[in-house]
Image: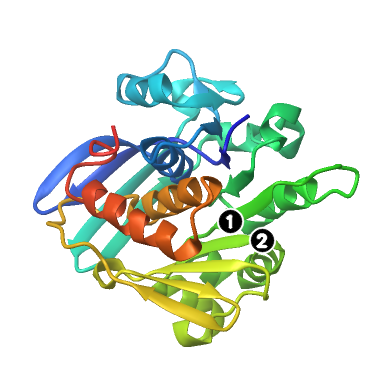
Amino acid sequence: MNDVFVIGTVSLDLLHFAGQTAHAAGGAGMYTALAVWKAGAKVGLFAPRPEPMPELLQPIATRLHWLGPTITSDDLSRLEIAHYGKGKANLLSTSWGAGETMLTPSGLTPEMKESAIIHIAALSSAARQLDFAMHLLNKKQISKPLISVGTYSCLVYKQAAQVRQLFDLADIFFMNENEANGLFGQVEQARPRPTALLFVTLGESGALVIQGDKVTHVHAVPTTELDPTGAGDTFCGATLAALAQGKSPIVAAQQAVGLAAQAVSAVGPTALL
C-alpha cells in the first residue's frame, strides 16, 4: 500500500534560465511523486509510461512505482519554459502529447485507490482532473482516500469554474500566490472549507498553511536559485509525504520548504534524484 499515489504526467522539458538552456525530465506528476519518494514515503505514480524509456527518464523509472498506459516517446508531454528570476516565468510552448488522453479514471486499479492520499496533479484541463476526483468520490467505494489537487495559472484564469469545483471537493489543495489571486481576488481571501487544507506557496517568502480561518506563515529556507522548475510540485509532494506520515500540516510545510529550496538549486529534478 502506498502512502501517496500521484495522478499526472511526466514530460521532457526544455528550460531556459540564468543564460543557460537545458533538457530535463519534468511534469507536475513526476516532480510531486519524486518529492514524496525523496521525503521518505511510499509513492506510486499513474502516468503514461514510454517504451523504450528515454535516457532522461530512466533515473525516474528506477525510483518510482510508475504505472500507466504504455506510449511511445513521441507521445510524451513536452514543455518549454523560460525563467527570469524572482519567481517570473513564461511557458513558451506546451504539447501534452497523445499519452495524456490515455490517462483516464478507468485505468485506476484497486491498488492505487488504497493509498492514504491520492494527489491529482495539474493536467491539460481542470475537467480532466474533475473526472478523476468524481471517480474517487464515488459512493460505491467502501473507504475513500484523502483527495489532494494541484493546479496551475492557465487553468485558474481560463477554467476558473472547474478549478473552483475541484477546490470545493478536495481535502487538500495546493496553489501558488498568483493562482490564489486569480481564484479568490487576493490571497488573503483564500479559505478552504473547515475540514480541508489549503497550501499556498509564496516563492522566496515561503508558504501559507490555511486551515479554516487559521492562517500560518511558514518561512522559506534561504537558497541560491538556479532552476525553479517544479518547485511548487516539490513542495506539494514533500508536504503530502509528511502528512501521510502523521505530521501536522505546519510541520509538513516546514519540511517541504526545505526540500523545495534544495530542488531549485539544481537543474530539473537533479537535487531530488
> Where is mark 2, residue-wise?
170
Q: Is residue 184 left or right of residue 161?
A: left
Asked whether disc 2 touches disc 1, contact meaning CB atoms under 8 Å apart, the reply is: yes
Report if residue 181 is visible in the image: no
Residue appearing at x 51%, y 74% in the figure: 210
| Quadrant of the snapshot with the N terminus | top right
Q: Is residue 42 left or right of residue 15?
A: right
Residue appearing at x 64%, y 67% in the figure: 196
Residue occupying the far top of the picture: 52
Residue occupying the far left of the picture: 19
Give the colour scheme of this rendering.
rainbow
Q: Position of residue 65 (x, y in %)?
A: 51, 24
> Where is mark 1, residue-wise?
149
Residue appearing at x 53%, y 50% in the figure: 246
- Residue type for callout 1: Val
| Quadrant of the snapshot with the C terminus | top left
Q: Quadrant of residue 56?
A: top left
Residue appearing at x 68%, y 69% in the figure: 195
Q: Position of residue 88 (x, y in %)?
A: 26, 67
Label 2: state its secondary structure: loop
How busy is the neighbourhood of tag 1: few (under 14 within 10 Å), some, or many (20 plus)?
many
Report if residue 70 is visible in the image: yes
Label 1: state its secondary structure: strand
For the residues labelled 2 and 1, the Cα–Cα distance comes to 6 Å
Numbered circles on residues, count: 2
Q: Which mark is residue 268?
A: none
Q: Is residue 157 left or right of residue 225?
A: right
Q: Position of residue 90 (x, y in %)?
A: 31, 61
Q: Quadrant of residue 57?
A: top left
- Residue type for callout 2: Ala
How busy is the neighbourhood of tag 2: few (under 14 within 10 Å), some, or many (20 plus)?
many
Q: Earlier in the sequence, mark 2 or mark 1?
A: 1
